[in-house]
Amino acid sequence: MIGRFVRLARPYFVMLAIVTVGRWLLGTAFGVPYERGTWYFSIVMLTLFASLFYGVFTRRWLSFRILQAVGLGMVMAVISQLVIWLSTVASYGLGIQSYFNHPFALTRQMEPVAFLPAMGSRAVGLVVNTILTGIAGALGWVLGALLPPRAE
């Protein structure tokens, strides 16, 4: 089942790569302050909306049940959070100031955050965002009833 979800989510993974690269570039190469640039390339928002849309379309056109839509959303969320986690590790490991280790992104405070507390924050994000994205998938599945039936 997870393999099917991963294959189905290929377009999402392309978008995830684009947003991740954009986020890296804005925060490092282009020097856009976090407060201004974080909203342009948000991995969490991309994942939530993708889960919502995937839930809509997979219900009507692939006959997914609600738990399948939830599962697909949660798989996308876990992979997205893994990308965020790895980007945070890379930022700390390489000593790079990026959007991934910005204090506000980690604790909603402006004081610097050490590596271990930062990773603790990312672990909370993994759990919370996976649950929220599953809920978005379920909501999308409910909205999928509004689409016309699949043409045979």
Image (cartoon, helix red, strand yellow):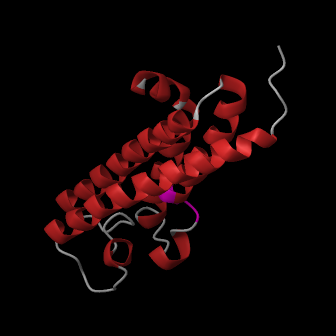
**On-image quarter of the C terminus:** top right
Magenta region, residue range: 40-44
The front one of 130 and 66 is 66
Q: Is residue 89 above or below residue 76?
A: below
The rendered magenta stretch, by its main secondary structure, is classed as loop
Where residue 87 appears, as percent x and y from the top left, is: 31, 53
Identify which residue is drawn at 80% across, 42% down.
146
Residue 31 in sight here: yes
Q: Quadrant of residue 74?
A: top left
**Is 68 drawn above or below residue 70 in the view shown?**
above
Is residue 42 in the magenta section?
yes
Q: Is residue 141 left or right of residue 117?
A: right
Q: Is residue 25 left or right of residue 65?
A: left
Residue drawn at x 68%, y 45% is 142
Q: Judge from the rendering whether residue 106 lies leftward or rightward of residue 129; answer left or right.
A: left
Image location of residue 120, percent across then percent down: 21, 65
In the image, residue 71 sits, relative to residue 38, either above or below, namely above
Residue drawn 80% across the image and 23% down it = 150
In this view, 90 is above or below 102: above
Whole-percent x, y for residue 49 in the image: 61, 52
The residue at the point 85 percent across, 33 percent down is 148
**Image location (x, y in percent) of residue 129:** 42, 57
